[in-house]
Image (cartoon, rainbow, N blue to C red):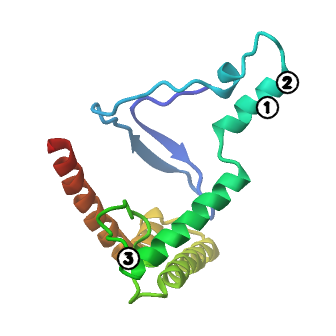
Amino acid sequence: MHRLSVRSSYQVKLPGCKKSQKMSRYISFNERVEVWIIQSISELLINHNNNEDDDELKLRSLWFQQDEYDTILLNLRYLIRAINDGKVGRNIYCTRGLERKLNAINKEGDEETTTSRSSLVSNLLKEQKEQYRNGIYDAQRLNQVCRTISRKDIKEATKLGILDETISRQILQD
């Protein structure tokens, strides 16, 4: 296997280009990340008795089963309804990721997301087709197409991230 150094450049032939282009890459790692060692499935399934029934039980315990998913979904629907009806306060439960479902004003939340995603894919494919037709490859232009369409989502995600950080700090201080 050929490994590239941490800072390196390499030649690559891109679709629609006659000449290869020099590409660069840089990799860095966050030193503050904590790594947790998680046992692999095979290690968890090691069974000295070679009992397949025990292995099946262990396997089932690793993932949610369909009935458990159904229960989670049902409880989630009850929670959303209770919050929207004002029977339960939003500050009692963590509702991260449910913002569109909880926002009674914006009932089109899921539809808006689907439309945004479809628009992104459509415009990206259109740009790639155009570049292919013209015999060029412009990664910056592809990036620009994605950024233009995703700008609103990026701003919203950034705001939510800052809010999450503030809440996390408050929880850690308590």
**Picture layout, residue 121 above or below residue 9:** below
- The residue positioned 72% from the left and 38% from the top of the image is 60
Residue 141 percent location from the top left of the image: 44, 71
- The residue positioned 41% from the left and 80% from the top of the image is 84
Residue 65 percent location from the top left of the image: 70, 48
Residue identifier under label 1: 56
- The residue positioned 47% from the left and 69% from the top of the image is 79
Is there CB contact under 8 Å for labels 1 and 2?
A: yes
Numbered label attached to residue 87: 3
Relative horizontal placement of residue 59, taking residue 154 as reference (left or right): right
> Which residue extends farthest top?
48
Marks 3/1: CA–CA distance: 41 Å
The residue lying toward the viewer, choosing from 30 and 46, is: 46
Residue identifier under label 2: 52
Name the residue type under label 2: Glu
Numbered label attached to residue 8: none
